[in-house]
Image (tube, coloured by chain):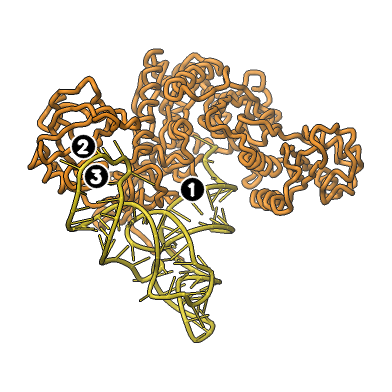
Chain colours: A orange, B yellow
RNA sequence: GGCCCCGUGGUGUAGCGGCUUAACACGCCAGCCUGUCACGCUGGAGAUCAUGGGUUCAAAUCCCAUCGGGGUCGCCA
């Protein structure tokens, strides 16, 4: 596109353009004033171009360039020259050439930047967020935004080619109980009534299946009013997807194909494990203590309860007698951990709910057989409570060799798994096992349908109440609901939950039964879910889907450590927008219209 | 809601009870400089040390509270 501002992009000029008269436009990335010659690196979306202002070539232009400062916006017309011998800059795509300016126009001036726009400066995030539009000028942020576009475009094209259609669903919706806290929108026309923003388009996509759109997807914005984390924002984006007449394997196969295609396109340098790994929920909890394991490294957990149930160590014995377990793993080569390093690990698990951490350093020459292990070589506060046979058995069970450091936690199973899964990540990180150039995807399958909530004394859905049961476990719902497994699957990469999905219940009667098992009264069921139940009664097809989180996926692809860096305008961890200063108060008139009255918060 | 880390010119850091009239780098302003590309040289401006209270003869420095940012546990069907 040629117009009065430019006819070429800065980054796209090269030696083929030598001798041409061109116009470019962009920002002053850097200015080097030699008194006579002035060099300006002009930057547009495509890259940098060195522009030379020679007073002998352009008297007026040189005077203008003298006025230019960082981030001024210029339009320059001139001739493309090959750079003098030895003056090439191999770090620029345009480094062989330069533009000799004839005319230059200042399109806009700029105040000095509130922070440097290079990638190397670590700037306080609150300042970056306040001036997010400037932060996005930084090359890394800009490339993250481009990467995100590319990923979404690939997803759309991939699904379109397979017959999926994208359908938008409402943002103003009905609040449904359970799950995350809803963002609410007060209604002007209906005093005292509220819309809710969707936590996901879950029910709507099921209704679209009832409508006969057999392959639906949407790049869907979702809203959840919960506390934030590095990988959580109050509003985030999912690739929401649903299909009719499918089974679990159809969905997983599609995901595998899609993610291999996207990663292969945008990060051909990344190594993937193919086919994607499959783990049952029970297996991943046993081996990794979590249902979102980082499978780039081993350090697998092992249960040693049976080995220490009758040992002389009272803590282990009583924990097991009271229904708890003892699990642990071995950190290879860490037998030389100092008292201080050991104390750090003890604090680490205590902060995560465990009462303590038992450590055993197996000292000696690496490679020595375990059979030669003697009590003297086991450096631990608790060595004396165990026989050498018990110590050897523990070492063998956790796959520890001489030179390794055994880490054991005793408590009830949920506490042990929570503490050890995080300790495993910590050791993986300390040992440098989290290769940034590998993405290990896996599916977690065979989730329990429901979980007993001890605090509220009731059954809760593991996923959501629309999840179908595995065929052979349907009868269990009447006898032992905790044992029944669901057609529910999670999609995990490098320790991040990318996605949850399930085959849904398409039988209205069964759906009603699940709701009542979850403690809803008939009135509540009708009031909250009546529309869905009614729809299921009108010939709903078997269907299922999944909804990968796009922010987290792009974060992994970009090698970023938080999703804010792959979202153009994110909020802080306290859900505030520092650029627009939102949320903010509104006028009394606005409140009046919405039938709202504020009260003083008791402090 | 709990725990942890951070807050010093525009930015990043140093200073951690008196050697401080708060230092350094980058940036900014002015002057010089015709082949630089993180240009160079000379000079200059710029800081209620987040805010409030306390301890002390003396506080950027120690303590408490508040505010802001981040991490994490709880929470996130």
In primary-sequence order, the first of circles 3 and 2 is: 2
Q: Is residue A57 above or below residue A508?
A: below
* Residue plotted at (86% across, 36% down): A392
Secondary element under disc 3, as helix, strand or loop, is strand
Horizontal arrangement in the rendering, residue A152 relative to residue A282 (left or right): left
Q: Position of residue A465 (x, y in %)?
A: 54, 31
Question: Mark 1 against mark 3, which lies toward the viewer?
Answer: 3
A525 in relation to A247, above or below: below
Name the residue that disc number 3 marks: A32
Specify whether residue A530 is in view: no
**Residue at 21% over, 48% down:** A69
Q: Which residue is mark 1?
A: A227
Mark nearest the camera among 3 and 2 is 3
State the residue in front, A282 or A210.
A282
Q: Which residue is mark 2?
A: A26
Residue A594 badge:
none
Q: Residue at x 82, y 48 (%)?
A: A380
Neighbours of disc 3 within 10 Å: few (<14), some (14-19), many (20+):
few
Residue A589 visible to an observer of this rendering: yes
In the rendered structure, the residue with mark 3 lies on which chain? A
Other-residue count near label 2 (Cα within 10 Å), few / some / many at <14 / 14–19 / ≥20: many
Q: Quadrant of residue A265?
A: top left
Tell me: B49 left or right of A311. left
């Amino acid at each position: 596109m040629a117009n009065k501002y430019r006819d070429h992009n800065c980054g796209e000029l090269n030696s083929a353009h030598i001798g041409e008269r061109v116009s470019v436009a962009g920002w002053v990335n850097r200015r080097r004033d030699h008194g006579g010659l002035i060099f300006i690196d002009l930057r547009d979306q495509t890259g940098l171009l060195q522009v030379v202002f020679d007073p002998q070539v352009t008297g007026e232009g040189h005077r203008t360039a003298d006025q230019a400062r960082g981030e001024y916006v210029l339009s320059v017309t001139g001739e493309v020259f090959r750079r003098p011998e030895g003056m090439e800059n191999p770090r620029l795509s345009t480094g062989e050439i330069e533009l000799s300016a004839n005319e230059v126009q200042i399109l806009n001036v700029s105040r000095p930047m509130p922070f440097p726009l290079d990638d190397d400066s670590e700037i306080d995030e609150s300042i970056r967020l306040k001036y997010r539009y400037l932060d996005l000028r930084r090359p890394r942020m800009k490339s993250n935004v481009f990467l995100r576009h590319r990923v979404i475009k690939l997803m759309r094209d991939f699904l379109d080619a397979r017959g999926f259609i994208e359908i938008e669903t409402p943002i103003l919706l009905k609040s449904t109980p359970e799950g995350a806290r809803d963002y609410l929108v007060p209604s002007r026309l209906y005093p005292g009534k509220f819309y809710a923003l969707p936590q996901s388009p879950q029910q709507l996509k099921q209704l679209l299946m009832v409508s006969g759109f057999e392959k639906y997807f949407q790049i869907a914005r979702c809203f959840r009013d919960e506390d934030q984390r590095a990988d959580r924002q109050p509003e985030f984006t999912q690739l929401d997807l649903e299909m009719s007449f499918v089974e679990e394997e159809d969905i997983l196969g599609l995901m595998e194909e899609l993610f291999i295609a996207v990663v292969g396109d945008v990060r051909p340098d990344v190594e993937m494990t193919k086919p994607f790994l499959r783990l049952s929920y029970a297996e991943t909890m046993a081996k990794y203590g979590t249902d979102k394991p980082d499978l780039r490294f081993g350090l697998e957990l092992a249960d040693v309860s049976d080995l220490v149930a009758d040992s002389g160590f009272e803590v282990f014995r009583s924990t097991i007698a009271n229904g708890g377990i003892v699990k642990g793993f071995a950190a290879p080569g860490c037998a030389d951990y100092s008292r201080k390093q050991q104390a750090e690990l003890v604090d680490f698990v205590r902060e995560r709910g465990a009462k303590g951490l038992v450590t055993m350093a197996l000292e000696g020459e690496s490679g020595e057989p375990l059979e030669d292990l003697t009590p003297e070589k086991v450096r631990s506060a608790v060595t004396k409570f165990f026989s050498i046979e018990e110590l050897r058995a523990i070492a063998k069970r956790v796959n520890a060799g001489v030179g390794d450091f055994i880490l054991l936690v005793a408590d009830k199973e949920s506490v042990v798994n929570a503490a050890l899964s995080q300790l495993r990540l910590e050791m993986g990180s300390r040992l440098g096992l989290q290769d940034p150039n590998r993405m290990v995807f896996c599916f977690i399958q065979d989730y329990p349908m429901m979980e007993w909530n001890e605090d509220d004394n009731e059954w809760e859905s593991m996923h959501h109440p629309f999840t179908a049961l595995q065929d052979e476990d349907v009868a269990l719902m009447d006898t032992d609901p905790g044992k029944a497994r669901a057609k529910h699957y999670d999609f995990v990469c490098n320790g991040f939950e990318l996605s949850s999905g399930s085959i849904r219940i398409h039988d209205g009667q069964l759906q009603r039964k699940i709701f009542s098992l979850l403690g809803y009264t008939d009135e509540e069921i009708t009031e909250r879910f009546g529309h869905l139940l009614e729809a299921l009664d009108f010939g709903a097809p078997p269907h299922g889907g999944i909804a990968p989180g796009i922010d987290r996926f792009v974060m992994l692809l970009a090698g970023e450590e938080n999703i804010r860096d792959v979202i153009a305008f994110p909020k802080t961890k306290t859900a505030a927008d520092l650029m627009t200063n939102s949320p903010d108060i509104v006028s009394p008139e606005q409140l009046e219209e919405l039938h709202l009255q504020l009260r003083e918060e008791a402090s």
